[in-house]
Amino acid sequence: MFIRNAWYIAAWAHEIGSKPLARIICNEAVVIYRDQGGRIGILEDRCCHRGTPLRFGEVVDNGLQCGYHGLVFDVDGRCVEIPRQERIPAKARVRSFPAVEKDEFIWVWMGDPAAADQGKIIDYPWHNDYKKWPHKHARYDIKGNYMLMVDNLMDLTHLGYVHRNTIGGNPKVHVEAKMQVTPTENGLHYIRWLLDSTPPPTYVKAAGFTGKVDRWQEFEYFAPGCIIQWSGALAVGRGAQVNREQEGGFQLRLFHGLTPATEDSCHYFWSTANGYRQDDPQATEQLYTEIDTAFQEDKAIVEAQQARLAETGYDGLVDIVSDSARVHMRRTVDRLIEAESKSTSGELTTA
Amino acid sequence: MFIRNAWYIAAWAHEIGSKPLARIICNEAVVIYRDQGGRIGILEDRCCHRGTPLRFGEVVDNGLQCGYHGLVFDVDGRCVEIPRQERIPAKARVRSFPAVEKDEFIWVWMGDPAAADQGKIIDYPWHNDYKKWPHKHARYDIKGNYMLMVDNLMDLTHLGYVHRNTIGGNPKVHVEAKMQVTPTENGLHYIRWLLDSTPPPTYVKAAGFTGKVDRWQEFEYFAPGCIIQWSGALAVGRGAQVNREQEGGFQLRLFHGLTPATEDSCHYFWSTANGYRQDDPQATEQLYTEIDTAFQEDKAIVEAQQARLAETGYDGLVDIVSDSARVHMRRTVDRLIEAESKSTSGELTTA
Amino acid sequence: MFIRNAWYIAAWAHEIGSKPLARIICNEAVVIYRDQGGRIGILEDRCCHRGTPLRFGEVVDNGLQCGYHGLVFDVDGRCVEIPRQERIPAKARVRSFPAVEKDEFIWVWMGDPAAADQGKIIDYPWHNDYKKWPHKHARYDIKGNYMLMVDNLMDLTHLGYVHRNTIGGNPKVHVEAKMQVTPTENGLHYIRWLLDSTPPPTYVKAAGFTGKVDRWQEFEYFAPGCIIQWSGALAVGRGAQVNREQEGGFQLRLFHGLTPATEDSCHYFWSTANGYRQDDPQATEQLYTEIDTAFQEDKAIVEAQQARLAETGYDGLVDIVSDSARVHMRRTVDRLIEAESKSTSGELTTA
C-alpha cells in the first residue's frame, strides 16, 4: 500500500527528450513524454484502442501517437486523432497524472488530481546552482520496497558495516555519534555530530584532511520519499558546530528521492553536489563515483533484505536503540496512509 | 480458452527428422516424431512410467523409446515394450493426437479424435509448386495469445505505423485504402485496393517500380488460426483490378498459421513465396529477409501488447472504424468456442 | 512435505571457511558458519533486527556479525551484541539448528532439536582414508525434488539408456542383471550381479579389462537421503562372488547424499573414491570426471522429469517390474512421514 496523494519524482527532467519514456510508479505503468510545446504528459501506458503500450509511439504535432494504429493523445490523455475516423468518442482517452517540472525533476501526483497542490512540492534550489553546487544525477532500479531504502537513510549506524571501506569508516565512530531527532510537520529532521573523529577515506581523498575532524550529517525527511542531506567536516578547532559555511573543509549535498515502483521495487533518484572544490569538474566526478560505489553497497543489502522479508514477513523483528529516527519515520508514513484511507479522496484514488 | 476441435499447424514437415521434437500446443506439452515407417506420431510428452518427457527419447524400430527406462510407444500412444517385463498392461499408454502431413505442414487435432475430419484441412497448393512459387518457411515463438496475432493481420492500417520503414510506407495510403470484407462459412475474406499509390520500399526493391502502382492485399481467414494472403502491385494503367496474373509486376503469397501454445504465447508459422522473379533464388531470399524484418516488428509490438493486457485485461478498450474485419473475426471465433462448449464432444475434449 | 526429524548433509566441511555460507534446506534459508573456536553454527539466515540475510555478515570474535547494523549471533542463535545498546532482550535471537561435523560432512537436523541424536548419524569411514580410498567431492544444485534423485538410484535399469555412452553400456546387460533386495531397519540394501558381462567404457578405461567380467553394484539406502554404493568388477573366473577384495580389478565407492532444498529442488552431495589405482592421482581425477559426466546426464533427465511432474502430478503413472527397490524405498519414506506427523515432536517441528 502506497500513499497516493503525494508528489513523487517520476524522472529526471533530462530523461524526457524526444522519445516517450516508460516507467512503473505506484504499481501503474505510465509513459512520460514532452509535447512539442514543451509540456510534460504522464499517461497510462496503454492505448485505449487495443491496449498497446504507448511507449512504442512517437511524439507528433498534436501529442503522442500510438505506434500500432496511429491514435494520438495529448498531455491530458484526451484522444485527439483516430486515423480514418472523424468523430472521436468521449471515452477514447487514457488516464493522465498531474505532472510538474521543477529543479531538474519531473514530479508526479498519483492520487486524486483535485488534491494535487503544486505548492506542496519541496524546493531543491541547489540543483539550479551549478556554480556553487556542481552536481551529477543518478537513478537506480532497486529490487526493494521504497520504505526499506528510507529505513536505510534513517539509521546511519549502518555506515560502519555496509560502507566500512568507502564512505563509512570505523563502526565505533558511527555508533557513538550524537544524534538529535526533531519531528517536523511532514517528516523529521536529524543531525548527527561526530566530533573529534577520524575522517573516512572519501573525505580524506576529497579534502586532504591530515588530522581529526568535526563531522556532521544533517538529514531532512519529507514523507513519503524525499530526503535532503547536508554532510561535511571541518578540521577540529575551526568551530564547525557554530559555522559550517567555511572554506577549506569538505561538504556535499545529497538529494535522495525514493519513488515506489511496485511493492517490492522502487526508483532511487539521487544527486550529489560538490561543495568544496567547485571549480574542479574532476572533484565532482570523483565524488559521484565514491557515492555511487557506496550506494551500490546499500542497494545490494536492501535487495537481499527485501527478498528475505518477502518470504518471511516482519514477524519477530526487534527494534533497537539506533532505530529512533527510523521508527518515527515509519509512524509518520503509517499515519499518512491511515489518513488517506479515511478521506473521500483516498477512496477515489486507491488503485 | 481455445477452440480444440480444429486443425492447427503443429510443425513444418521438415522439422520432424530422426529426433523427437517437443512443443506446447493448446496448453498440452506434446512430442512429435516420425516412426521408421514414416508415420507421424504426436504424443503427450510424458512417459506413463515415471513422467519423464519423451523428447529425451529416441526413435527405435517399434516406436519412440523413453530415454530414462526404455519403454517404447507407437504413433498411437500405445506402449509396445517394457524392458524386463512380458505383459504390458492396457493402461500403459500415453495420449496421442490425430496428425496429418500435408502441403509441407504437420497438422494436429487437439480436440475429440472422433471429430477429426481430414477433409476439413485447408489446401495450400503453392507449397507444392517450387517452380512457380519458390518459397521459404519460418517459425516464431511469440509471447502473445494467438488471437492478438490474428488481430494484427485483420487490420492493415498498422502497416503505416509499425512498418513505416519496411513493408508499410506512408500511413495515409493505408488509412485511405478501399477495403471490402466478405464473411465466409468459416471466417472471412477481404481485399484492399491501394490504387494509384506510391509503392513501399520492399516493392520497389523487388520489382523496380519507377512510378505509382495499383496495389492489392487479399486475405482469406480460416478460423481459428490460418490466413492465406496474396499481395502485389502492377504499374498504374496495366489494369490490375481486371487481371492480376500479369508479368512484370510484383506479387507474393504469404501463409500465416497461428497455433496457440499457452494463453499468452503462440507459434507463428509463416512462409513467403516469390511470385515475380521465380528463377532468382536471391529474390526469394531477399523477400524472406524483408518480410522477416517486418514480422519481427509485429512480434515486438504484439508481445508488448500481450504483457500489458495480461496486467490490465480488456476493460475500457474502444473499437474504431478500421476494426471491421477484426471485429468480425473475433465474433466468428467466439461463436465457434460457444458452439464447442455446448456440444458433447466439447465436454470430452476440454483440457 | 519433508521428513524433518532426520540428519541431512548441509555442506561439505571444507565449504565452511572464514565466510558464512547460505543454503536452503527443507525450505529454510540458513546460513552456516564456523566460529573462531571452530564450532559450526547453522542459523536462520535472517537477522532478528531488520530481516537482513546474515550471509552478508562476517565472523568476528564472539560470533557472526550482521553486515547491516552490526548485531552479533553465537552458534546457538543467541544475540550476544547490539551496537550502542547495553541490554540485549531475550527475544533478540535467531533460530538455530543442531549441527555436527563428521567424516568430512556437516550434518544438520531440521526437526525437533530435543530429538537430535548424534548417534544416528551414519558412518562413512572411507572419507577418512585417503591412502586406501583417495576421493573427491562434488555438490550439484538439482532442480528436482530429492526423492526423484533417490528414485534414480534405486532403479539401475536406467544405466543402459541414460548412460549408454558413459558408465552404462549395453541396456540388455542391465535389464537382465540379477537383483536382490533386502529391507533394513531404516531403508534397504540391494546388490546386483552382472555376471560374465562386457565391462562398460569407464571400467575398461580405468582397469584395462580385455575380456568379460563379473560386475557388482551394491547399494545401501538410509532414509531419507543417503546412499552408500560399492561397485566393481573382476575378470571372469577370479571368483568375485566369493571375494571382492582382490587386487587387479576395478572398484569404487560412491557416497550419494540428497538433501531437500525446496519441494522442487535439492542438493546432491556426492564423493567418489578410487579403489583400484590408489597411488595414481590421475586415476582419481579421471574417475571423478567420468562419474561427473554421467551424473550430469542424470541431473538433466531428473530436472526434465521434475518440470513435467510439477505440471501434471503423478496421475496415471504405471509401476513396472524394475521398480521393486524404488517402490520399497518410497513406502519407507511415506511411513516415516506418517509416523512423524503423528508424533508430538512432529507437530512442534513442522515448518
Image: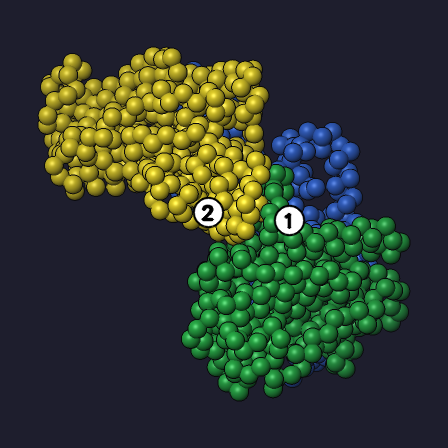
Chain colours: A yellow, B green, C blue
Q: Residues within 10 Å of mark 1 (few under 14, many from 20)?
A: some
Q: Which residue is depicted at the point 69% across and 78% down?
A: B125
Kind of residue at disc 2: Gln
Camera-side mark, 2 or 1: 2
Along the horizontal axis of the image, is B239 left or right of A12? right
Seen from the viewer's position, the closer of residues B158 and A217 is B158
Residue A128 visible in the displayed image = yes
Kind of residue at disc 1: Asp
Residues at marks 2 and 1, CA–CA distance in whole angstroms? 46 Å
Q: Which residue is depicted at the point 18% across and 25% down?
A: A233
Question: Disc 2 designates what residue?
Answer: A65
Q: Residues within 10 Å of mark 2 (few under 14, many from 20)?
A: many
Q: Do the residues labelled 2 and 1 touch (CB within 8 Å)?
A: no
Q: Which residue is depicted at the point 60% across and 72% down?
A: B241
Q: Is A104 situated above or below B162?
A: above
x then y, percent, for residue C166? 60, 72
Along the horizontal axis of the image, is A173 left or right of C175? left
Q: Which residue is depicted at the point 54% across and 34% down?
A: A310
Seen from the viewer's position, the closer of residues A306 and B135 is B135
The kind of secondary structure element at disc 2 is strand
Along the horizontal axis of the image, is C16 left or right of C119? left
x then y, percent, for residue C270? 57, 57
Q: How many marks?
A: 2
Question: Disc 1 designates what residue?
Answer: C264
